[in-house]
Amino acid sequence: MRYILRNLGFYLLAFWASITLNFMLPRFMPGDPVSRMFARSQSQMQPEQIDQLRRLFGLDNRPMWQQYTDYIKDICTGNMGISISRFPTPVSEVIASQIGWTLLLGGTALVVAVVIGNLLGIIAAWRRGGLLDSVFPPLLVFAGSFPYFWLAMGALYLFGMTLGWFPMRHAFDVGLSPELSWGFVSNAASHLFLPALTIVLVSIGGWMLGMRNTMIATVAEDYITMAEAKGLSPSRIMFRYAARNAMLPSVTNFGMALGFVVGGALLTEVVFAYPGVGFQLLAAVQGLDYPLMQGIFLTITAAVLVANFLVDLVYVRLDPRVRVR
Amino acid sequence: MSALDSRAEPVAPAAPPPAAGTPKPRRARAGLLRSLLANRKALFGAVVLVVFVLLALLAPLIAPGDPSKINSLGASAPSGSHLLGTTAKGQDVLALTLWGARSSLLVGFCVGLAATALAVLVGMACAYFGRIVDDVLSLVTNIFLLVPGVPLLVILAAFMPPGTATVVLVLVVTGWAGSARVLRAQAKSIRGKDFVAASVVTGERAIRIMFREILPNMASVVMTTLLGCVIFGIGAQAGLEFLGLGDASVVSWGTNLYWAGNDGALMTGAWWVFVPSGLCIALVAFALAMVNYAVDEITNPRLRARRTKNRNRKG
């Protein structure tokens, strides 16, 4: 319990730090993006739009501390301003309409990569020096060296463009509307396959190697020898005795890997024009839509922190030692 | 106090940790270099790196003139006159790739060095001073580790004036935390060793203990984190520029890919425009990773010993 509360406090602190960073960036940066943005779109902006931007970026005459407390209050109530590129939609609505696709893409890719990567790692360590152990690691390290978005470009070109096996863009065909029917789900799955595959390919090597290395150390422990001496079946020793203990560092890494996968998903979305927040982030960058950029940053940070907290809960379940402490 | 001082006097020459400590890491380092060259992975990585650095340095000789100059018909496939074809605008892809190596490698190594330096400072301060310094710096490190990198990169880069300096700065800010955590753990374990305690007792200055006593004993860890930071720097720079947040007028692998995407190289089937730059990024990253694994293998006796044992079992 204490462990969980301590981590919860840490996540809240981390979130507060990102809000503060968000608050300070437009106010203390030398580049003055606000005037850049004003200069570019002043003529098309509505008066109330300019007002809300001034308020958001602290160009009104409130004292700094009051701006700060107002800002935190706004964020906590989900009010992140109004998008510029999609005026007059509030930032929170823009993000809400798209975060689902990012969660779907990132979540699918992460789960597949973790499960397959860890399984490969377990088997490679169990059969040390075997085919799996000697061929896969260098291959996967090489795949992991590619930038996410470049592998996505290659996959799109090869399977989408040249071979025509998979659709090239968006999350579902034009003309369909999201619903829970077999036709729509299978259509969305075929759109999901390529982007998810590229993320899995890049990230799977890390999981496999990490698992392999801890597993090698675990297999050398005395209690494994003991289990073998007792005559337990090899698969039982492998999964229940060795893998269960070797998994703990993998679980801890999960939280940190999350940030990387989210980043990879954002860039992959850009290539596939997948309608998630990553694609929206690119649009925000191109349209100098600072409120939307900041909103996306905060939302993704919050999502990663929540996911980390969930991982902590799982960890307590897996490792009895932290429950005692 | 004076009694303590006078007692400390004879102790200093009797237990001279710096004298005993300095030759040891130097010998270890020379040995490391030799075993690195004998290691196949490391040799492969080093050769690839040297080739890329040479190509980057010799770019003005191999492909003279401004690489972004338009000097032919657009979007032609690889041929005798343009070995790697031309972009949709009519620039030579080979020249763009060669010149791109300059910016990409430079930024990558700058980011790597700066981020590692920052990580060493933070890790050392954590380990040496402990207590409140450790608590505060660890907290900051963990926050930076937890906040997702790409969105953070984007908002930092978007709010700063565009340019290569901004890219380097932003990448250092987002890239140091992972290394700092590793270095802190390593430095902490060395901080607990007797020879460090001895040099504290002999009254050496904190800076000297940190950088002359502790640092040389973790050279290999610093090396692996440095290589890791360079890999991060090259990849993240490409990602940032691909999103259009770099300086689009600079020729680098990232901006090459940005223009390839913008000019619709994918849709027109011009694979030769985006393949070379991405392949170069992957090759450099792979070479660095190989050197990294080699360093790990050589300096981690457990991995090495088990490997030979395994080979014996097989043979």
Image (cartoon, coloured by chain):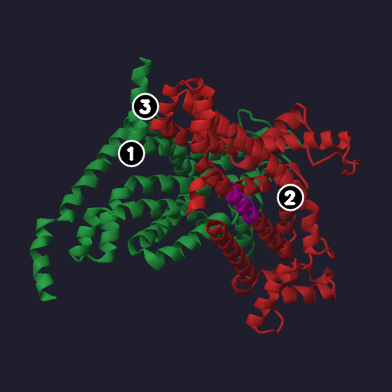
Subunit under mark 2: A
Mark 1 or mark 3, which has the lower sequence index?
1
> Quick one: which chain is green?
B
- Left or right, A312 with respect to B311, comes to right
Which residue is label 3 attached to?
Answer: B307
Tell me the kind of residue under disc 2.
Answer: Phe
> Quick one: which chain is red?
A
Please state which of residues B195 and A61 is positioned toward the viewer in this rendering: B195
Which residue is label 1 attached to?
Answer: B299
Please state which of residues A256 and B262 is positioned toward the viewer in this rendering: A256
Query: Of all residues shown, which one is farthest toward the top?
Result: B315
Horizontal and vertical percent position of residue B147: 59, 57
Q: Which mark is residue A279?
A: 2
**Circle nearer the viewer, 1 or 2:** 1
Tell me the kind of residue under disc 1.
Answer: Thr
Q: Are marks 1 and 3 in contact (CB under 8 Å)?
A: no
The magenta span reads A304-314
Q: CA distance from mark 3 to mark 2?
A: 46 Å
Please state which of residues B194 and B99 is positioned toward the viewer in this rendering: B194
